[in-house]
Image (spheres, grey):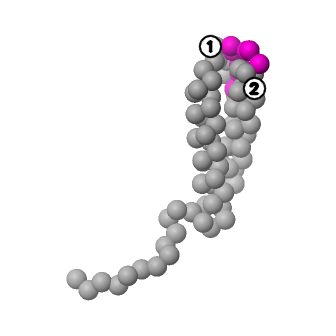
Amino acid sequence: MIDRLQKYKDRLEAYYTAELAILGGAQSYAIGGRNLTRANLAEVRQMIEYLINRIEMEEARVNGKGRNKVLGAIPRDF
């Protein structure tokens, strides 16, 4: 899980770099060896938001606060 968390953080850093390049006027950039042309700032920002959410989920999971944690159970007699 920590490996996945680090990968998300690395990708987020790459997208922040791409965002800065786009804001600086670049219309093409490279992420992970892939060259992209006609950069779309909206798509880059959308991916940044996605990666931030994934990082938060992974950090919560690593800290034992994942969304699948059972807080209590109600016994029922069917």
For residue 27, say whether it is visible.
yes
Look at 60% across and 48% down and name the residue there: 54
Q: Quadrant of residue 7?
A: top right
**Residue 53 percent across, percent down from the top left:** 60, 47
Relative to 16, 44 lies left or right: left
**Residue 44 percent across, percent down from the top left:** 62, 28
Look at 60% across and 34% down and name the residue there: 47
Residue 27, magenta (yes or no): yes
**Residue 75 percent across, percent down from the top left:** 35, 84
Identify the disc placed on residue 20: 2
Boundaries of the magenta span: 24-31
Relative to 14, 58 lies left or right: left
Look at 60% across and 20% down and name the residue there: 40
Could you give the CA–CA distance between mark 1 and mark 2, rounded to whole angstroms? 14 Å
> What residue did someone put label 1 on?
38
Q: Is residue 48 above or below residue 34?
A: below
Q: Residue furthest left?
A: 78
Query: Label 2: few (<14), some or many (≥20) within 10 Å?
Result: few
Task: Tell me the element at label 2.
Answer: helix
Q: Nearer the viewer, residue 2 or 42?
A: 42
Q: Quadrant of residue 60?
A: bottom right
Quarter of the image with the N terminus is: bottom right
> Is the C-beta separation of discs 1 and 2 under 8 Å?
no
Quarter of the image with the C terminus is: bottom left
Q: Amino acid at mark 2?
A: Leu
Look at 62% across and 67% down and name the residue there: 64
Q: Quadrant of residue 11?
A: top right
Circle nearer the viewer, 1 or 2: 2
For residue 33, say whether it is visible.
no
Residue 46, magenta (yes or no): no
Q: Amino acid at mark 1?
A: Arg
